[in-house]
Amino acid sequence: MKLYLTDIIRYIIILAISALLVFLIPITKSIGTISVIPCMLMFSFLIAFLINRAMERRQKLSENVSIELSFLRRIKHLSENISDQAWQEKMIDALKEYQKKLSEDFLDRGRVLGSSRRFTHLIYKFEPSNRYEEVIMQDLLSVTRELAQKRQYIEEYLNYRFLPTSWLTLITVGVFIIILLILNREPSVTNQLGTFFGVAVILLCLDFIRQRNGFNKNDVQEYQERYKKNIAKTKE
């Protein structure tokens, strides 16, 4: 994963907001009798669980994309062993078209449905002329079935999002912690710096989980770049 300018800007904005909350809000009488530790423990468990789920989903998505790209190259290589040149050209064109559309808009998997049907129908309707081509077609059919399964997994991982109740709980606990930290401040510099770090960590964690739950422009571009590179490999 690359570090983009937008990430740095967002990081600076979060630190600035944390500083404003801690250093500009007037210090009131401390309510130190109210412990923030239970809320922090709950927040830690929730954020760790959700981050783990989000990272696991992204890892599986990346793995299935890699497998899909590998299957597409294998279909192309197997197709090159078919003697029908016209069929072979249609197959390679269909594979390129499918990957080109995904390289332009990775999130809209629905727009590639026609392209995927184009090369799968070529495989299903082809009639082998000899025993060698029958073996090749059996392999093609097997890869095509597995490819369809991987496409389904990719769509599920792309559509998965945390439940609204998970977000509501996480944000509520995070806000409670920030309020308690601010209300418990003391005039000393070390105490205010500690409060600043605590507030910043809460906001950074919320921002991180928001980023991992969805796909921003940079994430999409990285996936689209993988399909662009695979188009070049498909030509080899």
Image (spheres, helix red, strand yellow):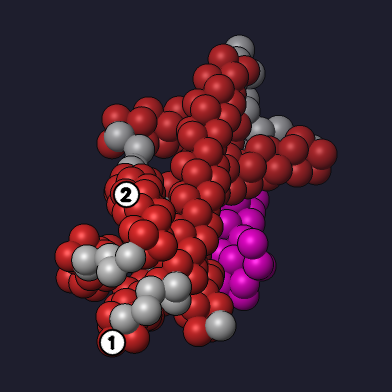
Q: Secondary structure at mark 2?
A: helix
- Name the amino acid, label 2: Arg
Circle 1 packing at 10 Å, graded few (<14), some (14-19), many (20+), is: few
Q: Secondary structure at mark 1?
A: helix
Q: Which residue is mark 1?
A: 86
Q: Residue at x 17, y 65 (%)?
A: 125
Q: Is residue 147 above or below residue 206?
A: below
Pinpoint residue 229: horizontal percent, then vertical percent. Answer: 55, 78
Q: Residue at x 51, y 61 (%)?
A: 70
Direction from residue 186 to residue 58 in the image, left or right: left
Q: Which residues are magenta?
A: 1-23
In the rendered structure, does residue 217 fall within the stretch colored magenta? no
- Is label 1 in contact with label 2 (beta carbons under 8 Å)? no
Q: Residue at x 41, y 62 (%)?
A: 132
- Name the amino acid, label 1: Ala
Circle 2 packing at 10 Å, graded few (<14), some (14-19), many (20+), is: few
- For the image, the number of numbered tags is 2
Q: Which residue is mark 2?
A: 145
Mark 1 vs mark 2, foreground winner is 1
Direction from residue 235 to residue 8 in the image, left or right: right
Using the image as rendered, state which of residue 23 and residue 150 is in the foreground: 150
Mark 1 or mark 2, which has the lower sequence index? 1
Using the image as rendered, state which of residue 123 and residue 222 is in the foreground: 123
Pinpoint residue 187: horizontal percent, then vertical percent. Answer: 73, 38
Image quarter of residue 110: bottom left
Using the image as rendered, state which of residue 214 and residue 110 is in the foreground: 110
Direction from residue 1 to residue 57 in the image, left or right: left
Pinpoint residue 19: horizontal percent, then vertical percent. Answer: 63, 54
